[in-house]
Image (tube, rainbow, N blue to C red):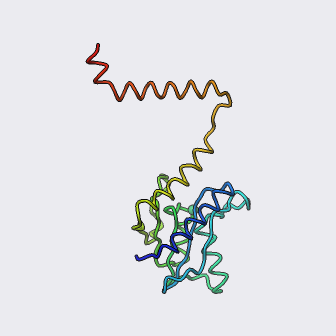
Amino acid sequence: MNLDNKTLDKLYKLAEKAYKKGEIPVSAIILDKNNKIVSAKYNNRQNKYNILGHAEILAIQNLEKKTKDWRLDGYKMLVSLEPCDMCSMVINKSRLDHVYYVLPSESNDKNDNFSIKKSKLNIDKEFELKFQKLLTNFFNNKRWKPPFLWYNIQQEGLVWLIKFYIENIDLIISIM
Ligand SMILES: [Zn+2]
């Protein structure tokens, strides 16, 4: 699919917005037959206390309200991350034509039982990395770190030592 940079930019900005609000940075855009944006949403599960607050479902609900029709034949969706099972089911039932995602999902709840038509978007590697970085940063910030500085430093030192050992194993063996 041919996508203009403006649409992709918008997808990124939405994901960034989610990130800034402490949500998993995922965004979804729905396009009509002429590739015009008709709905655009990002995750709000945390802030709205809403189990259904995934970008894909919110974008679908938004468009359905606008068109006063729950059937979305003829529309396609862009999403920054491959949809989860819950969203796949809703996408399937909403009859969206096709889903294009930027990043493949690494989650293993992908049992593909919901037979949605989906494919990975072919975009600039650099742009893809921007999306990836947003997600990685989000999950890195969430990870628990011990509150004691000395412990973190020690841990980092140990990781460095192990890495050094693995990377230079040939050299170490030859010296011994
Ligand atoms: Zn989802």
Q: Is residue 150 left or right of residue 136?
A: right
Whether residue 135 is situated above or below residue 17 in the rendered picture: above
Q: Position of residue 98 (x, y in %)?
A: 46, 75
Q: In the visual, does 141 lie left or right of 48?
A: left
User: Is residue 123 found left or right of 68 in the rendered image?
Assistant: left
Residue name at image x 42 percent, y 68 percent: 121
Query: Which one is in front, 26 or 74?
Result: 26
- Determine the residue located farthest toward the right in the rendered image: 48
Quarter occupied by the N terminus: bottom left
Q: Name the residue located 73 percent from the left edge and 59 percent from the top edge.
A: 47
Q: Residue at x 53, y 49 (%)?
A: 136
Ligand 1 quarter of the rendering: bottom right
Placement of the C terminus among the 4 image quadrants: top left
Q: How many marks?
A: 0
x, y percentage for residue 163? 41, 29
Of residues 108 and 155, the one nearer the viewer is: 155
Residue 72 at x, y = what percent? 55, 82
Taking the view exactly as shown, the residue that stands out farthest to the left is 174
- Which of the 4 image quarters holds residue 90? bottom right
Does residue 144 lie above or below 154 as drawn? Answer: below
Left or right placement of residue 121 versus residue 9 in this view: left
The image shows residue 58 at horizontal and vertical percentages of: 64, 70
Tell me where residue 140 sits by quadrant. Answer: top right
In this rendering, is residue 133 above or below 159? below
Residue projecting furthest to the top: 176
